[in-house]
Amino acid sequence: MTYIHGLGHFHPENIIDNAFLRDLDIGTDADWIMDRVGIERRRTVLPLDYIKTTRNADPRQAIEASLYSNAQTGARAAQQAIAAAGLNPSDIGLVISGSCSPQSSCPAEACTIAAELGIDAPAFDLNSACSSLAAQLHFLDSMRPERLPDFVLVVQAENSTRAIDYNDRNSCVLWGDCSSAQVISPRVPSRLKITHSQFASNPENCDKVRFVNAGHFTQEGRTVQTFAIRRSLALIAQLRERLDQARAAALKFIGHQANRGMLDNICRSAGISAENHFFNVNEYGNCGAAGAPSVLSQHIGDLRDGDVVALAVVGGGLSWGALMLEVCA
């Protein structure tokens, strides 16, 4: 059993709306974007003038142009999560970070975030692209509680717009930036607990989604979306099998925030009603590993005692995972 004590998220202030993308003159407009992905706006750590002028032709320049580092955005989300848990940074005994596009591999991004927060504790990265949250929490949930500190900070710092080619309408309509964080405990009870976790991957298809160092994001879009829908439906079915009929029917759902159409397809096929589906992809775009946890952070106040939430995510690797979350009195 793992308990979540605090949640946080941070979206940078610069907004890429559909009118902005239309004005780039890359063959897209609001109707095309809404019909294709259902996303109205996204956030970015990049200056909008930089995108207009360069289209981010050289992602190496995006690092210098960025308004924030991953350490800074990750720390902002973490500060919110730590405050929500009623703790101080000094209470954190371990920091784990992971995302699609970490800004550095040495030092580990968890170390740079811990330094930004003034946390003196072990820190390391556990990355699995968009499914990093499931990988991180499944890893922690599988460990012997006595080997872990009372409170662990888990972060997903995603500023992937640095890797987007703004001449490629298929990619640039999708991505936005966000960082999310969770304070968890292996033994101190809280209102929100993880009652089940799972994670798996199929490395044979590792080339289907790619973020490469100093390069542009690429993916086989149709193949990846088909995979995401199929795996998400399987994860929902597996989680429902763990519940009685009444609780399974009332299950809340948070999916990987890839695009609105994909999520609507999943909900129709799984019989999930609109009131039980939480999402934010229409307002913030695909925020990679931070997408689903940012939805949970935004909607934690909407959950009532006894609610059960299925959080199902998929990502590069290809990988997939799920958490079952229960709200306790």
Image (cartoon, rainbow, N blue to C red):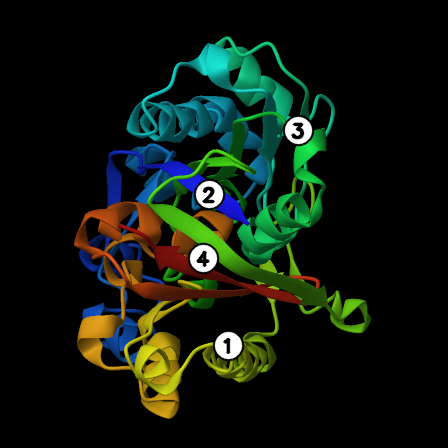
Disc 3 designates what residue?
Answer: 104
- Quadrant in which residue 21 is drawn: bottom left
Structural crowding at the residue carrying mark 1, measured as other residues with C-alpha within 10 Å and reported as few (<14), some (14–19) or many (≥20): few
Q: Amino acid at mark 3?
A: Ser
User: Mark 4: which secondary structure?
Assistant: loop
User: Mark 2: which secondary structure?
Assistant: strand
Residue 296 image position (x, y, % from top left): 33, 52
Q: Which mark is residue 3?
A: 2
Instruction: Identify whether 194 is placed above or below 61.
Output: below
Disc 4 designates what residue?
Answer: 167
Instruction: Identify whether 272 is placed above or below 102.
Output: below
Structural crowding at the residue carrying mark 3, measured as other residues with C-alpha within 10 Å and reported as few (<14), some (14–19) or many (≥20): few
Q: Which mark is residue 318?
A: none
The answer for how far apart the CA atoms under marks 3 and 1 are is 39 Å
The answer for how far apart the CA atoms under marks 2 and 4 are is 44 Å
Disc 1 designates what residue?
Answer: 242
Along the polypeptide, which appears first: circle 1 or circle 2? 2
